[in-house]
Image (spheres, rainbow, N blue to C red):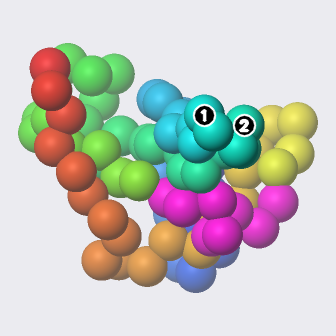
Amino acid sequence: MVVNVLDGKQLGGIMDIEIDISNGRLTAIVVPGPGRFLGLFGRNEDVVIPWEKINKIGVDCILVESPSNAQIKPTDD
């Protein structure tokens, strides 16, 4: 579960990751956009959270700083 430390909202689980192949580094995580449930209902938009905004990665939870105007990108579904 990904949780935003700025407002305490649960953003959902990680749907995808972005990797810089040339450096072998994780650059961002992707979580479902608002209104999306299990990929079945709602809009096809994902929220991309850059690596710099990830505060802590735990066993059950990832804490991030995601402002309300986080980068949202359409999916190619």
* Rendering quarter of residue 75: top left
Q: Is residue 65 above or below residue 48?
A: below
SS assignment for the magenta stretch, majority: strand
Residue depicted at 64% across the width and 59% down the height = 51
Residue sitting farthest toward the front: 22
Dot 2 amino acid type: Gly
C-alpha span from label 2 to label 1: 5 Å
In the image, residue 49 lies at what x, y percent?
50, 58
Please provide the residue range marked out in magenta.
Answer: 49-56
Task: Write down the residue under mark 1.
Answer: 21
Give the image quarter of residue 56. Answer: bottom right
Residues 27 and 75: in front is 27
Q: Is residue 20 visible?
A: yes
Question: Which residue matches tag 2?
Answer: 24
Q: Is residue 35 visible?
A: no
Q: Position of residue 19 (x, y in %)?
A: 58, 38
Residue 26, horizontal then vertical, whole percent: 66, 44
Are circles 2 and 1 on residues that touch, CB within 8 Å? yes
